[in-house]
Image: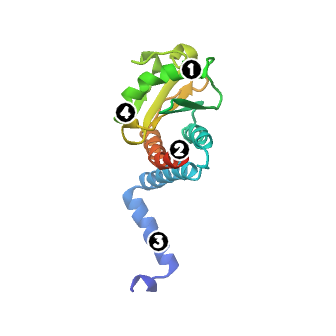
Amino acid sequence: GEAASIDDDALVSLAREATEAAGQVPVAKRLADELEVTQAALAVATLPADRIEEAASGLALQAAEALSCEFGAVLLEEPLRLFTADRGWRPAASDEEVMGALLPLRQAARKGLLMEQDIGASAFPYRPLAYEDGLVARLVVPLGENGRLGLLMVAHATGAPRGFTSLCQRVIRRIAEVAAPLLERAVA
């Protein structure tokens, strides 16, 4: 076709003009964001799924890492099982106490993403996952349709207080989408 006859210099110059016309930063930013979402999804998609323990704890860790969080947790349903990832913060409590604090979040996140930018003002101030315990912000997503497999939660701690961006929300939603079939395989 005609495109094949354009030399490289002309293509580079056309690309530069197109990028400048579209506004360089937004295009580059959009591509970087897409790459971040894809890389996070790929890290989860390639988790070992032979054993549910490996898959679920790997998911908690990958999600926490992808979102630069200090804590990650996966609560699986039937039977209830907890898998956590400590990246600088962990609750000073038993798994049973952590599960008790996650159960109310499970209901709230059944229909989709639950984001709390300020855990100090949370409708779910349950210890040991409360502001008093050292958490400042959290994202919770259901795993599987209506959360039938469980939930995934990541949180920022007071040591590095910050909130979640729209990109963070896209990343965790994509992670949950990719994780559901992986967890189903691991359970089967």
**In whole angstroms, how far apart are the C-alphas of marks 2 and 3?**
53 Å
Q: Quadrant of residue 5?
A: bottom left
Quickly name the residue at label 4: 110
Q: Amino acid at mark 2?
A: Val
Structural crowding at the residue carrying mark 4, measured as other residues with C-alpha within 10 Å and reported as few (<14), some (14–19) or many (≥20): many
Sequence order check, earlier mark of 4 and 1: 1
**In whole angstroms, how far apart are the C-alphas of marks 1 and 2?**
21 Å
Q: Amino acid at mark 3?
A: Ser
**In whole angstroms, how far apart are the C-alphas of marks 4 and 2?**
20 Å
Q: Quadrant of residue 106?
A: top left
Q: Secondary structure at mark 4?
A: loop
Quickly name the residue at label 2: 187
Quickly name the residue at label 1: 96
Which quadrant of the figure contains the N terminus? bottom left
Using the image, determine if residue 118 lies above or below residue 24.
Answer: above
Indicate which disc residue 13 carries.
3
**Front: mark 3 or 1:** 1
**In whole angstroms, how far apart are the C-alphas of marks 3 and 1?**
61 Å
**Front: mark 4 or 2:** 2
Residue at (42% x, 16% y) in the render: 121
The spot of residue 104 in percent (x, y) is: 42, 22
Sequence order check, earlier mark of 2 and 3: 3
Sequence order check, earlier mark of 3 and 4: 3
Q: Is residue 126 left or right of residue 146?
A: right
**Front: mark 1 or 2:** 2
**In whole angstroms, how far apart are the C-alphas of marks 4 and 1?**
21 Å
**Front: mark 3 or 4:** 4
Which scheme is used to colour this image of the protein?
Answer: rainbow
Sequence order check, earlier mark of 3 and 1: 3
